[in-house]
Structure formats: C-alpha cells, structure tokens
C-alpha cells in the first residue's frame, strides 16, 4: 500500500475528494494548493478519518516555489511514495474569444505546474527505483473541440508528457498513471449546464485511488468515455468540424 502521497490541487473538487478517500491511520498525505483555509478544512477531514495530513500553501504556476515545496513536504512526510497532480483551471472562453493572457494562465497551471511538480517526483522516484506519478488529464485532451482550444491543448500536452515519463521510468520501477475524467461534479463544472455521464467527485476519487495501487496506466473514470473518445478520434476532421460541439 502507498503510505505517503502528495496531492497538488487538494483544496477543492477531485483533489479534495481524493484526499478524503485516501485518508487512513497508516497513511500520510501532503496537501498542496493556494487557499490555506480550504486546505485546513481538508486536513481536518483527513484527521477525522484517523489520517495524517501536512499542508503546503503553494502556487503551482510558480516553478521555483514548487521545487521548494516538494522538498519541504518530502522532509515532513519522511519520504514520498506517490504524487497526484490534480491542480487545474478551466476559465470560460467565449466562442469568438482568442485571449492569450487567459490561455497563458491556463498553460501555467495545467502544464508548467504539472511539469514542475512531476519532474521533482520523477527525479526522486528514478533514484529510489519505485513510486507512482499520476496526472489528471481530461477527455478534452483527446480531440480539439470548439469550446476551449487551450484547455484541450493543455490536457493533450499533459497526456503526452505523462506518456513520455511512463516510457522513460518503467525500467526504474516507476508507474505513471494518466486519469482522463469525463465531467465530474465539482466547482469547476458548476454553472456550466448539463453534461453527459457526469459522476460525483467521490466516485472519481475512488477510481483514482484504485488506479494508484495498480491496473491500467491510462484510466477513463467512467468507462463509456474510452469508447466514445475512440470513436470521436476516428471521425475525419472534415466531418468533426461540422458536427462536434
Ligand atoms: N471537473 C471536471 O469535470 C473535470 C473533468 C476532467 C478533468 N478535470 C481536471 O481535474 C482536475 C481537478 O479539477 P476539479 O474539477 O477538481 O476543479 P476544482 O474543484 O476547481 O479544483 C481545482 C484545484 O486546482 C487547484 N489550483 C488551481 N490553480 C492552482 C494554482 N495556481 N496553484 C495551486 N493549485 C491550484 C485549486 O486550488 P486553489 O484554488 O486553492 O489553489 C483546486 O484545489 C483539473 O486538472 C481539471 O482540469 C476536471
């Protein structure tokens, strides 16, 4: 069993539900996000379940802060067995909007922050010869759709980065897991209208917790999405641009 797990983006939604799901007396969690009070609430919930939680307030988009926070947590947890990068942002984007500042802010958290944190873990786990690295991608990264070009591109970049880490690190005994949730009921999706096959954050967290311990390394949280995305990926672009939203 994985005993020391860092969750980046633990203050809300999927990361928060995962912390609660993973909480148990023989496990230590490192909880990272920007909002200290939300993190304190999550830590209290973990402790109510008998677990141990250490908090690190950190902006994932700040690469130097990520490096320092990783080392601080590693010391306080007395080592790390697994890391889950769950931090992410998905601002609303108007159909006719092309806003580079907004896009850059998305890339900073969804891609650069992931690379900063997961590179720290990759170096550590490579030298230890064990460990689990997990990133929360999205079905949105499987095909370039209209609503949010850079959100989808950020998840596609994360998927490819994780695949490369997997191909590098398997010889060192390190598992690299890519989670592709479909819609999950969290603050990120509130107010965005009805979404198909939506699951709750605790259901997503349970599936992610299973995936950390073993099984396939690319996981669609709700299984129909694997087949839906397989079909969508094979629709020729000339048709996809006309019919897919
Ligand atoms: N909900 C969905 O339907 C869905 C579907 C597919 C994929 N995902 C992915 O799942 C992940 C979690 O999303 P969610 O639905 O749980 O969203 P959420 O409830 O909005 O939570 C986002 C988390 O990311 C953290 N975060 C955002 N910016 C950060 C920054 N600069 N530094 C550190 N932490 C930061 C937030 O913490 P602070 O604000 O406290 O910093 C929060 O803990 C994201 O990567 C998202 O893209 C979600």
Image (cartoon, grey):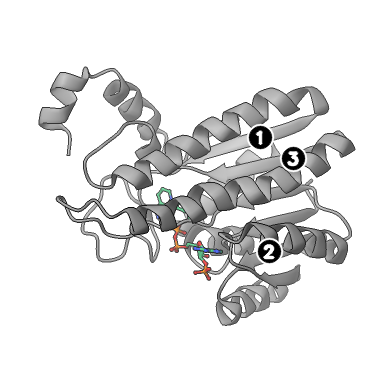
Q: What secondary structure is found at the residue carrying circle 2?
A: helix
- Marks 2 and 1, how far apart at CA: 23 Å
Give me the residue at 33% from left, 53% from top.
Answer: 100
Report the residue marked by disc 2.
Answer: 65
Q: Residue at x 60, y 79 (%)?
A: 36
Evaluate whether residue 102 shows in this view.
Answer: yes
Residue located at (35% from left, 58% from top):
102
Give the answer, above or below, for where 125 lies relative to 8. Answer: above
Give residue 194's quadrant in the image. bottom left
Q: Distance between the residues labelled 3 and 1?
A: 9 Å
* Location of residue 135 in the rendering, given as x and y in whole percent from the top left corner: 57, 44
Of badges 3 and 2, nearer the viewer stands 2
Q: 14 or 157: which is nearer to us? A: 157
**Residue depth check, mark 3 versus mark 1: number of the one nearer the observer:** 3
Label 1 residue SS: strand
* Residue that carries the numbered disc 1 in the rendered image: 176
Q: What element carries label 3?
A: helix
Give residue 84's mark: none
Q: In this view, does 59 lie above or below 155?
A: below
């Amino acid at each position: 069993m994985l005993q020391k797990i860092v969750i980046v983006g633990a203050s809300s939604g999927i990361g928060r539900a995962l912390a609660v799901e993973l909480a148990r007396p023989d496990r230590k969690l490192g909880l990272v996000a920007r909002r200290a009070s939300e993190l304190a609430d999550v830590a209290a919930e973990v402790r109510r379940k008998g677990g141990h939680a250490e908090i690190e307030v950190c902006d994932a988009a700040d690469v130097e802060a990520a490096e320092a926070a990783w080392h601080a947590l590693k010391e306080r947890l007395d080592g790390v067995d697994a890391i889950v990068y769950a931090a992410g942002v998905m601002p609303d984007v108007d159909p006719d909007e092309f806003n580079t500042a907004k896009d850059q802010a998305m890339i900073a958290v969804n891609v650069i922050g992931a690379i900063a944190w997961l590179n720290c873990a990759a170096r550590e786990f490579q030298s230890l010869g064990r460990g689990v690295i997990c990133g929360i991608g999205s079905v949105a990264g499987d095909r370039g759709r209209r609503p949010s070009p850079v959100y989808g591109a950020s998840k596609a970049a994360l998927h490819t980065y994780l695949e490369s880490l997997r191909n590098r690190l398997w010889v060192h005994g390190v598992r690299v897991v890519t989670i592709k949730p479909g819609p999950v009921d969290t603050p990120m999706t509130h107010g965005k209208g009805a979404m198909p096959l939506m699951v709750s954050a605790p259901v997503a967290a349970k599936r992610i917790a299973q995936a950390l311990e073993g099984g396939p390394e690319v996981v669609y949280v709700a299984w129909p999405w694997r087949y839906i995305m397989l079909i969508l990926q094979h629709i020729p672009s000339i048709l996809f641009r006309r019919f897919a939203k």
